Amino acid sequence: MRKRRQALAVGGAAVVVLALVVGLIVWVSRSSSQPSAAAPSAAASASPSAAESAAAFPPVPTGADPALSKKPAVTAGTGTVSKLRTTTLIKGTGAAVQSGQTVNVNYVGVNYADGKEFDSSWSRSEAFSFQVGAGSVIKGWDQGLIGVKVGSRVRLDIPADLAYGEKPSGGQPAGTLRFVVDVLSAS
């Protein structure tokens, strides 16, 4: 009796393994022979939250310039930056940012001298939030974003003393920096 049960258990396991192998072969052959049919089924099987997350980045304000939905090209600067310069690239129509508000932004940061990108919210597909004027970011951001309207894209040319300094520790970029910042919300 015991040997019979063992034989049935082994036989049942073999049938399950065989069914899995056959199913895998059928699935692979269908997906490779019908690539156009595979894409819609993959999209249909994606969870709604994943689809919503992809559609939600970047969270562009209603009525804002559609250019805010694309990562800006940021190049090196020319000349010397001795004080903070805020240049409006796209003028938003929302309320002006005030000290103490929490803002949600997208940004690209480059070294001013050579234009080499060192950080970007776009590369993470996630906007960045912080409280303006609270000292949680470099001084150039705390000062340069005050008065900028929601829905704006601005370029901040930030001297080293308002950024990380000439010889920062912890891997931060040294010297004068350039950021292009999209202000998505403020509250």
Image (spheres, rainbow, N blue to C red):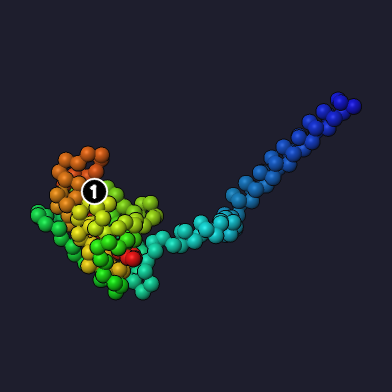
In the shown orientation, is residue 182 left or right of residue 40?
Answer: left
Q: Position of residue 146 (x, y in %)?
A: 22, 64
Residue 82 drawn at (x, y percent): 9, 54
Image quadrant where one finds the N terminus: top right
Within the image, what quadrant is residue 180 found in?
bottom left
Please name the residue that numbered disc 1 is placed on.
116
Q: Residue at x 32, y 61 (%)?
A: 102
Which secondary structure, mark 1? loop
Total marks placed = 1
Residue 39 left/right relative to 97:
right
* Residue at 55% from the left image edge and 60% from the top image edge: 48
Picture coordinates of residue 99, whole percent (x, y): 24, 63
Residue 160 visible to an observer of this rendering: yes
Image quarter for residue 63? bottom left
Q: Amino acid at mark 1?
A: Lys
Packing grade of label 1 (10 A; few <14, some 14-19, many >=20) is: some
Q: Is residue 174 left or right of residue 67?
A: left
Q: Residue at x 72, y 37 (%)?
A: 17
* Residue sticking out furthest to the right: 1
- Between residue 51 and residue 16, name the one nearer to us: 51
